[in-house]
Amino acid sequence: MYGRDPWGGSLEIAADSGTDDDRSRNLNDIDRAALSKPLDETQQSWLLGPHEQKKKKYVDLGCVVVSKKIFVWTVGIILGAGLIAAFIALLVNTLPHHHPRPPPPDNYTLALRKALMFFNAQRSGKLPKHNNVSWRGNSGLEDGKSDPSSISKNLVGGYYDAGDAIKFNFPQSFAMTMLSWSVIEYSAKYEAAGELNHIKDVIKWGTDYLLKTFNSSADTIDRIVMQVGNGDTSGGPSPNDHYCWMRPEDIDYERPVTECHSCSDLAAEMAAALASASIVFKDNKAYSEKLVHGAKTLFKFSRDQRGRYSVGAEAEIFYNSTSYWDEFVWGGAWMYYATGNNSYLSLATNIKMATHAGAFWGGQDYGVLSWDNKLAGAQVLLTRMRLFLSPGYPYEEALKTFHNQTSIYMCSFLPFFTSFNRTKGGLIQLNHGRPQPLQYVVNAAFLATLFGDYLDAADTPGWYCGPNFYSTDILRTFAETQIDYVLGKNPRKMSYLVGFGSHYPKQVHHRGASIPKNKVKYNCKGGWKWRDSSKPNPNTIVGAMVAGPDRHDGFHDKRTNYNYTEPTIAGNAGLVAALVALSGGKSTLIDKNTMFSAVPPMFPIPPPPPSAWKP
């Protein structure tokens, strides 16, 4: 039987000749045959119908749409990382810490801490609770009140100059200037030594007092205080600060106030002290401005009222000033740095001014910085400007001259040259064998280290002495050998810094240190037994640098011989400056910028652009 085949051709329909079992067997055979042949995609689509794809799920984050799967994995990773970080932080905070110990401070740092304590022992007035000198107390609380003609009725405060109770403004101002200079250059080293706040406190104690010694609120003045107390014993045995040997706390005699009306050197030095301190305290705007105003008033007075402060005065015996021209250069430089006013720079770089100050004279004290002669310090200070600012015309000629002369000073400090003799122990004789040599030595050590640091900061490896070139390292070596001598590397194995090491002077020429604090008030002559005693001082005046040895390295530890055993604030200021400069080696550079914080840009301001062209 035939039928119609829908795929084409004829279709034979067999007769129903077999049984149901046969038909079932035949169908199974057909199924196996069909399954044994693989189906192509078209056939599979007929049998299975259209394939349904799974829809991906997304998360809309507002700014971006991401796959939900990726979102879940990302969040999981972030949460997992957070848990791991929290676990690590927990471990770090709970486990014991083993920080490496910092290296022990070097000898210069240890000596610095002690040298600063001397200023605490020299304070006059109502002492702060943190003064930390157990045998000192309030003193000089009546200063200024006994003299009705004095500028100020309140001259309480400041520092006693040395082993007595006189307050001399001239060396005190120099001491404050030197300390401020060292802070401006080496504040990071003071910070590392833990002494920055201390040194600032020391400076402010001095500048607060100096502001009392003239009318600091005025623009123009006609007099300043130069001294409180007196020590001239030539007029007979009358009670004063030299004839009597008393603790400052027990003084009951009158302390006269000495003023001056023509004292250019003193006024310019006081101006330098206030101007340099204004840079130290620049972050205290009100106080810094007060210091600057006072400095301007003083410097104007110094220029208007010419004269040496010590002429005909008692100070001529103790702190005689030989000239005021060096203070004009020194003070002018500090006034420029504190104000940025070019008129001060023009004055400081005036070659005629430097000539009057002795810049071209030579002489045995040429290049020696002291409380009397500041020319060497002024020239180093102005060389700084040439190295770091290069102001050019019209200052370059003078600055180049100062730079060259500074180089000559530094050459004269070296052992290869014969400008200065040395003791057999190696101490340079900057005062040519005269007494009290150490104050000059420490100032030279400071200048040498500082000049070397200037050259290093200017990427200059050294300087020339004639045809020979010397590296900056030799300057530091010079400074180290001199300071090491002071600290005990000398033929006597004697540390001339009281309290440093185990062998130091025990009979320091100092009233407060030599009289015991035993609730007994010794009168003017009653203290003489302590002055003349051969026993060590009952109070150790830690940090005092004594006057020093003689030219043969000899030293007499005897209280009555002040040329060996008396300390001064001017000497200690130079020592502090040298110690901080050497402390920590070369690991910390100088602060190049703070000195110039008030200095305007040295280059001319470019002109404005031309206006737009109009037809």
Image (cartoon, rainbow, N blue to C red):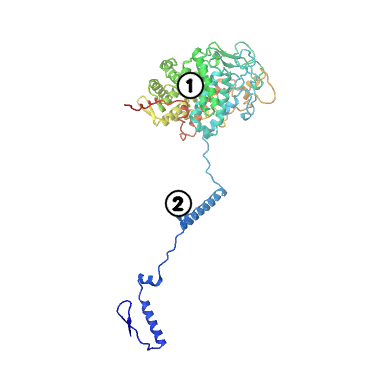
Quadrant for the C terminus in the image: top left
Residue 574 visible to an observer of this rendering: no
Quarter of the view holding residue 381? top left
Q: Which amino acid, by three-letter code, is at mark 1?
A: Met
Question: Where does residue 312 sit, x and y in percent of width and height?
Answer: 54, 10
516 or 161, nearer to the observer:
161
Q: Is residue 13 above or below residue 609?
A: below
Question: Where does residue 38 sit, x and y in percent of width and height?
Answer: 35, 74
Question: Where does residue 460 sit, x and y in percent of width and height?
Answer: 39, 30
Asked which secondary structure carries label 1, the reply is: helix
What distance separates the C-alpha of mark 2 from that of mark 1? 64 Å
> Mark 1 sits on what residue?
335
Quarter of the view holding residue 545? top right
Quadrant for the N terminus in the image: bottom left
Question: Where does residue 230 sit, x and y in percent of width and height?
Answer: 60, 15
Asked which secondary structure carries label 2, the reply is: loop
Residue lying at the far left of the rendered structure: 9
Residue lying at the far front of the rendered structure: 4
